[in-house]
Image (cartoon, rainbow, N blue to C red):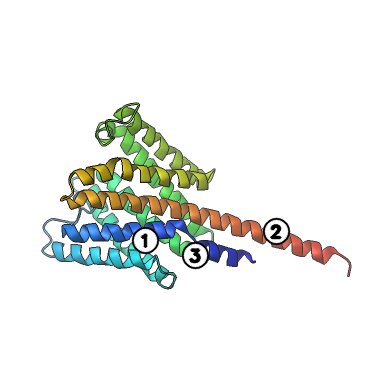
Amino acid sequence: MGARELARRLDQASLGKTFLGAAALLFGISSFVQGDFTIMGQPVPQSSSLRHAIAYVLAGLLVVSGAGLLKSGTVRPAARTLMVIFGIYSLCYLRVLVGPPVQVNALMGLAEQSSVLVGAWAVLLILRENGTFGPRAARIAFGICSLIFALAHFVARVPMANAVPVWMPGGQMFWALATGVGHLAVGVALISNLAAVLAARLGAMMYTCFVFLAWLPDAFSHPAEAYRWAGAAFSLCMAGALWLVGDLIFTRRLAAAMERGQTSRAHYTAAIPG
């Protein structure tokens, strides 16, 4: 089996692609039920006369593109659509960030939306099978997002601690800071490309823990508040995106190793007298 064929088969079995697709679908459904942009995740101007119409359109596109990632024949257009959607959300946060007035708090939201955009881009990069700039840029971009997440945990440690279930051993502040260290470790690993795949896997698992330990219990306690379900689904989108970055790094490394092995065998065969 050639390196490219192996990479193609690995992509077909990509857990990250399925992960992101299902999460985007759920995020779209929760956004559609809410009938508006989520309070924390999508800072679209309140003054827009088409706000609710656009919210429904983007929610529908999230559902369609999420489902599209689950079918091999529609992966590319689905990933491109997700890039556009989360690119729009990122621009909304960028507008809030630069102001006027400048709102530094929006940096966290910008990083969150951008991280999912990078995950959708990773799908396309895995399918492309060649080139080094894109995978490197995606890896570093998600690493920068992770560093911003870490900064938010340290600077806004009290609000972060309040989101931690009170029953967890060690105390709420411990886990707020510990997960901040986790974000920091993921960011450093991705940017330096040291243990990057392991960091991506563990980071995605950490995001998933946020969903099951914080978001979902809160959502079940307030089932009528759709934005809580949207928050859980969006956190799953981030987890799927990070897993996809790990898939991208892994498949490129494996393909490169196989290419080197095939080249070495070819040189060895050519050196044997006929």
Q: Amino acid at mark 3?
A: Gln
Distance from disc 1 to disc 3, alpha carbons, whole Å, reads 13 Å
CA gap, disc 3 to disc 2?
A: 23 Å
Residue 136 visible in the picture = no
Residues packed near mark 3 inside 10 Å, few (<14), some (14 to 19) or many (20 plus):
some
Q: Earlier in the sequence, mark 3 or mark 2?
A: 3
Q: Nearer the viewer, residue 82 or 88?
A: 82
Quarter of the image for residue 42 reads: bottom left
The quarter of the rendered structure image containing the N terminus is: bottom right
- How many neighbours does mark 1 have within 10 angstroms: few (below 14), some (14-19), or many (20 or more)? many
Q: In the image, 232: left or right of 225?
A: right
Which residue is depicted at the point 40% across and 65% down? Answer: 70
Q: Residue furthest top?
A: 170
Disc nearer the start of the sequence (1/2): 1
Residue indicated by mark 2: 261
Q: Return the residue at label 3.
A: 12
User: Which quadrant is the C terminus positioned in?
Assistant: bottom right
The residue lying at 32 percent from left, 49 percent from top is 235
Label 1 to label 2: alpha-carbon separation? 34 Å
Secondary structure, mark 3, is helix
Crowding near pointer 2: few (<14 within 10 Å), some, many (20+)? few
Badge 2 marks a residue whose secondary structure is: helix
Q: Label 1 sits on what residue type?
A: Gly
For numbered disc 1, what is the local secondary structure?
A: helix
Q: Quadrant of residue 262?
A: bottom right
- The answer to whether 218 appears left or right of 175 in the picture is left
Q: Nearer the viewer, residue 244 or 50?
A: 244
Is there a contact, CB below 8 Å, between mark 1 and mark 2? no
Q: Mark 1 or mark 3: which comes first in sequence?
A: 3
The vertical placement of 74 against 28, above or below, is below
